Amino acid sequence: MTVSKAWGVPTVALCALLATPHAAPSAPAGEVRCFKIKVVDDKTGRGVPLVELRTVNQVRYHTDNNGIVAFFEPGLMNRKVFFHVKSHGYEFPKDGFGFAGASLETKEGGSAELRIRRLNIAERLYRITGAGLYRDTILVGEKPPGREPLLNAQVAGQDSVMAVPYRGRLYWFWGDTARPRYPLGQFQTSGATSELPGKGGLDPNTGIDLTYFVDAEGFSRKMCPIHADGLVWIDGLLTVLDESGRERMIARYARMRSLEKMLEHGLAVFDDQTETFRKLRELDLKEQWRCPRGHPFRAKENSTEYFLFAAPFPNVRVKAEWRSLTDPNAYEAFTPLVGGTRYDKGASKVHRDPNGSCVYAWKPNTDPVSPAQEGELIAAGKIRPEEAWYQPVDIDGGKAVHFHGGSVNWNEYRKKWIAIAVQVWGSPSFLGEVWYAEADAPAGPWRRAKKIVTHEKYSFYNPAHHPFFDQEGGKIIYFEGTYASTFSGNEDPTPRYDYNQIMYRLDLSDPRLRKP
């Protein structure tokens, strides 16, 4: 028996035993038999994850985080094999018959490299969560980055991220979490920590070393354990000094019967002793906007600092202090409605100045207006299209882009407020087209947008830009989202990748982001 120097595990026909457990190995003991196929970006040379390789008899493989497929197929070794090659937002050259792929000599222990062209403006980097992040890398005898490249805290899948720096570390929280042993997993929020880059953490270009909060069985445990029926999710995650000057981590919790039915919501504070969120106060279900939500960020107006809440646009704010944050009456909405009124579709009262111009402003005790509601006001003739703040159009084609979820942050490189958001009713995916937009003020107006990531009939929802990972003065930014077949109509989920978080990198100097 030999031991791989790259990973420190037995490699007695390791690839064959894992890839085809019932096959009789034909190579001598100790030989790594897999044929390594690496798919790389033709411009950067970096391995591309989530590339599908498919044989003519419909056997499918997907590259791991290093862009590697460890191929071993009894009967198809040491011969020419054709692989169809495809990936969301990437293209592979077609041959004379229109097939995008290549024939490779599948030599046991050999390797081949395929170069693929990126169409996306943003570059896919790696999958953050789930099992088998570097499965194929290990099968070909190479060493992956990070401490848990195969199965971390028994997590097979995780939904929708919230992340914030807190007390010198990064804290990560997700919604529902899947596990290998049974279809039903954990539904009261999961969590982990990681070190900051430059302070013990990996470069975000490489990955994230997550240390999960786990239960007695080693599985990702409940971080918001409310002893009542329903799923428990958090959003609006932020840190603030309490009245004693101590840094605290707060979020809005929501106890859900289903995606559409909320049973309860309120404020939760992180307890550093139990390392879980506990209820701070329950809030009125009838006015769900008077609380943290979405992805918060800080911004100043004159000398006052506020929290603004992007969901996807920041149309709610509160002073960045404990007392105001925990008082629902202190919240203000950025809205075109007459002060003190409620949104009521076509019957809504819109505020106009003496010149007849629609007035958007921060107002207390007044309902905010979402992009969809703003669209209803336009359809009802209450607001003219040119007066809208939340109806960006594609800078290339001029078509309206309806944002669903996303985040907003200040960007020092662009000297703009920037949004990363997913489109609803997009094409070619219903909820998988990711866009970039800029504004001069945090509330907008948001006029134009550029698509930066596309998916073919697959979702990529709740994208979040992580400003704590920004590099080169904000020129390079990182964002992630939930890659899932949910809402897509796709009945063929991608193995290992489905229902997990994937990280992208965006270079804001790319000229395609701005209209010529």
Image (spheres, helix red, strand yellow):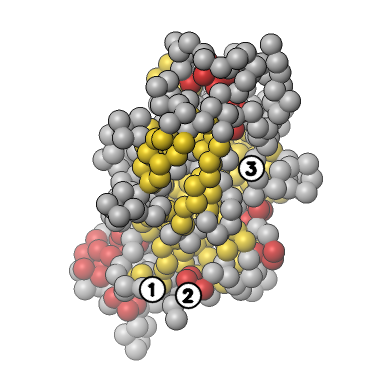
State whether residue 290 appears in this view: no
Q: Quick one: 64 or 330, which is closer to the camera? A: 64
Would you say the residues marked 1 and 2 are in contact, meaning their CB atoms lie under 8 Å apart? yes
Q: CA distance from mark 3 to mark 2?
A: 29 Å
| Direction from residue 312 to residue 276 in the image, left or right | right
Dot 2 falls on a residue whose secondary structure is loop
Dot 3 falls on a residue whose secondary structure is loop
Which residue is tagged 2? 514
| Direction from residue 36 to residue 376 in the image, left or right | left
Mark closer to the chain start, 3 or 1: 3
Q: CA distance from mark 1 to mark 2?
A: 8 Å
Q: Residue 460 at what x, y percent from top left? A: 41, 47
Q: Is residue 436 above or below residue 28?
A: below
What amino acid is found at the position of numbered circle 3 in the picture?
Answer: Gly
What amino acid is found at the position of numbered circle 2 in the picture?
Answer: Arg
Q: Quick one: 146 or 448, which is closer to the camera? A: 146
User: Disc 3 or disc 1, which is closer to the eye?
Assistant: 3
**Image quadrant occupied by the C terminus:** bottom left
Q: Residue 364 at what x, y percent from top left? A: 47, 63
Question: Dividing the picture into quarters, in which one does residue 392 lie?
Answer: bottom left
What amino acid is found at the position of numbered circle 1 in the picture?
Answer: Ile
Which residue is tagged 1? 395
Which disc, if any, is residue 207? Answer: 3
Tell me the residue at 45%/48% (across/down): 462
